Image (cartoon, grey):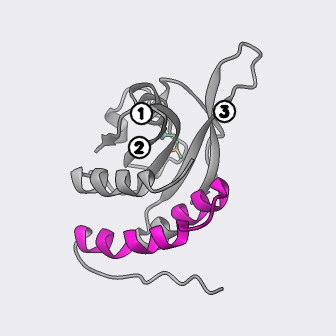
């Protein structure tokens, strides 16, 4: 089955309004989480051309202390750090607070984890199931101040459409 994404030019809102039904179409009827995360990362990367788009999932830590940590999941972009502890970096803070974080300048975010030295701004959206964070969507841009309330609203809608 061909799965072609229709890429458009336009305002950010117009782009999301075109993209979201296509993403929902890709997710529709597919129960496999990894397949769905992979396609969402690819669709966002293809449409927006951001530096890095991907997911970290809450999984058991390698240490035997029973903790959990974020582990790298499906993504598009440069290779990235594989494990992030709760509260660490933007991803770990989003997990800890169960909230979307917009970082206009990563150099001003205390504890930011620089997986790529090219990253200048970032947005992280938690995936929430049964009131618990089960992962995060992380998006990085090479340009400063690239993410705003429009991205928050639509990326939260996209993440809510993923059945975890
Ligand atoms: N910058 C993130 C780490 C993940 S990479 O950007 C892919 C953070 O501070 O949590």
Instruction: Using the rendered view, name the quadrant where residue 100 is placed.
Output: top left
Task: Measure the alpha-carbon separation of dots 1 and 3.
Answer: 16 Å
Queried on whether the Cβ of the residue with tag 1 lies below 8 angstroms from ligand 1, the answer reads yes
Secondary structure, magenta segment, majority class: helix
Of residue 25 and residue 68, the one placed in the foreground of this image is 25
Mark identifier at residue 124? 2
Mark 2 or mark 3, which has the lower sequence index?
A: 3
Helix, strand or loop at disc 2?
Answer: strand
Residues shaded magenta: 13-41
Q: Are marks 2 and 1 in contact (CB under 8 Å)?
A: yes
Give residue 19's position: percent from left, percent from top: 38, 72
Mark 1 or mark 3, which has the lower sequence index?
A: 3
Give residue 119's position: percent from left, percent from top: 44, 50
Of residue 14 and residue 122, the one placed in the foreground of this image is 14
Residue that carries the numbered disc 1 in the rendered image: 94
Residue pictured at 42% horizontal, 51% vertical:
160
Helix, strand or loop at disc 1?
Answer: helix
């Amino acid at each position: 089955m061909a799965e072609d994404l229709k890429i458009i030019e336009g305002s950010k809102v117009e782009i999301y309004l075109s993209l979201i039904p296509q993403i929902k179409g890709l997710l529709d009827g597919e129960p496999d989480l990894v397949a769905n995360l992979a396609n969402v990362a690819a669709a966002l990367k293809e449409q927006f051309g951001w530096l890095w788009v991907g997911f970290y999932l809450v999984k058991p830590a390698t240490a035997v202390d029973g903790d959990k940590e974020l582990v790298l999941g499906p993504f598009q972009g440069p290779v990235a750090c594989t494990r992030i502890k709760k509260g660490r970096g933007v991803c770990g803070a989003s997990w800890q607070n169960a909230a979307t974080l917009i970082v206009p300048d990563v150099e001003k975010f205390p504890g930011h984890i620089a997986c790529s030295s090219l990253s200048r701004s970032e947005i992280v959206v938690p995936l929430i199931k049964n009131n618990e964070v089960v992962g995060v969507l992380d998006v990085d841009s090479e340009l400063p101040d690239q993410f705003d309330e429009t991205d928050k609203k639509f990326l939260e809608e996209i993440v809510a459409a993923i059945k975890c």
